[in-house]
């Protein structure tokens, strides 16, 4: 069985978990306090980051590279289109959420509100929280624009781009930092992806000291 070293609210870990579940790959989850820089974990990934996946006798790091490995080894159901142009769009949007959205939103909200407390790094920076709350509105509007023109974020079929976005938004939704009233089309998209069997384990996550809001696991939120 595969083994994933992860942190429950990490969007990068959640993205890999979604891919594993969508492809029905059984996986043992091992929660990793990566900030403690445990020697065994650093041997698995000298970069000191999660996720790390043990599978097929390999130790894999970096969420994007892990997802593409899983796609190549387990191509059904496909999460990357065949056409080069369409693949580029999926990868562009994965980069958008894992780089731009992460820097402007996730790191300003989730990391300030949750990670700092868990890691005992002090109190949230109110300026960062305000900046993140402002920036997420721009990103939700951009998603709404995409979904006004497409069935899914990158095109007519669900892809890794949708999982990347849903991983970030689900982690932020756990702490009630997503205004689902801002866009019905984005809310409908999230409800659709949230209803997939692959999402069940994520909706069951519980982080001690941080209870999720009532709507978090509600498929008809």
Image (cartoon, helix red, strand yellow):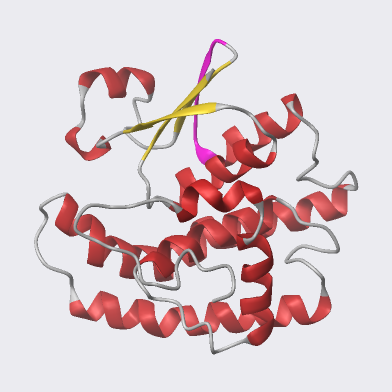
85 shown above or below 177? above
The answer to whether 117 appears left or right of 31 in the picture is: left
Query: Which quadrant of the figure contains the C terminus?
Result: bottom right
Name the outermost residue toward the bottom.
182
Q: Is residue 60 magenta?
A: yes
Query: Which quadrant of the figure contains the N terminus?
Result: top right
Q: Residue at x 71, y 82 (%)?
A: 145
Residue 50 picture location, percent across and down: 39, 37
Q: Is residue 218 magenta?
A: no
Q: Quadrant of residue 7?
A: top left
Residue in front for this viewpoint, 214 or 19: 214
Residue 69 picture location, percent across and down: 66, 29
41 shown above or below 177? above
Q: Quadrant of residue 186?
A: bottom right
Residue 144 picture location, percent across and down: 67, 81
Q: Quadrant of residue 189?
A: bottom right
Magenta range: 57-63
Residue 4 picture location, percent across and down: 45, 29
Q: Residue at x 77, y 52 (%)?
A: 88
198 shown above or below 132? above
Name the outermost residue toward the right.
83
The answer to whether 199 appears left or right of 49 in the picture is: right
Q: Residue at x 40, y 85 (%)?
A: 134
Q: Residue at x 81, y 70 (%)?
A: 151
Residue in front for this viewpoint, 187 or 145: 187
Residue in front for this viewpoint, 204 or 44: 204
The answer to whether 71 appears left or right of 180 in the picture is: right
Count of marks, rendered view? 0
62 shown above or below 85? above
């Amino acid at each position: 069985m595969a083994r994933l070293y992860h942190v429950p609210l990490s969007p990068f870990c959640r993205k890999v978990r979604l891919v594993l579940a969508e492809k029905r790959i059984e996986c043992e989850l091992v929660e990793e306090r990566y900030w403690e820089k445990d020697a065994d974990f650093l041997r698995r990934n000298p970069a000191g980051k999660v996720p790390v996946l043990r599978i097929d006798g390999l130790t894999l790091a970096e969420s994007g590279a892990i997802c593409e490995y899983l796609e190549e080894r387990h191509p059904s159901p496909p999460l990357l289109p065949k056409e080069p142009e369409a693949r580029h769009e999926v990868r562009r949007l994965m980069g958008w959420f894992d780089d731009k959205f992460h820097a402007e939103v996730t790191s300003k909200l989730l990391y300030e509100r949750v990670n700092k407390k868990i890691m005992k790094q002090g109190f949230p920076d109110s300026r960062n929280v305000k900046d993140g709350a402002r920036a997420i509105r721009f990103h939700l509007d951009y998603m709404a624009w995409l979904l006004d023109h497409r069935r899914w974020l990158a095109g007519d079929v669900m892809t890794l781009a949708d999982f990347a976005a849903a991983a970030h938004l689900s982690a932020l939704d756990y702490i009630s930092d997503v205004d689902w009233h801002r866009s019905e089309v984005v809310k409908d998209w999230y409800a659709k992806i949230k209803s997939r069997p692959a999402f069940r384990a994520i909706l069951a996550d519980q982080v001690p000291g941080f209870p999720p809001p009532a709507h978090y696991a509600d498929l008809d939120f």
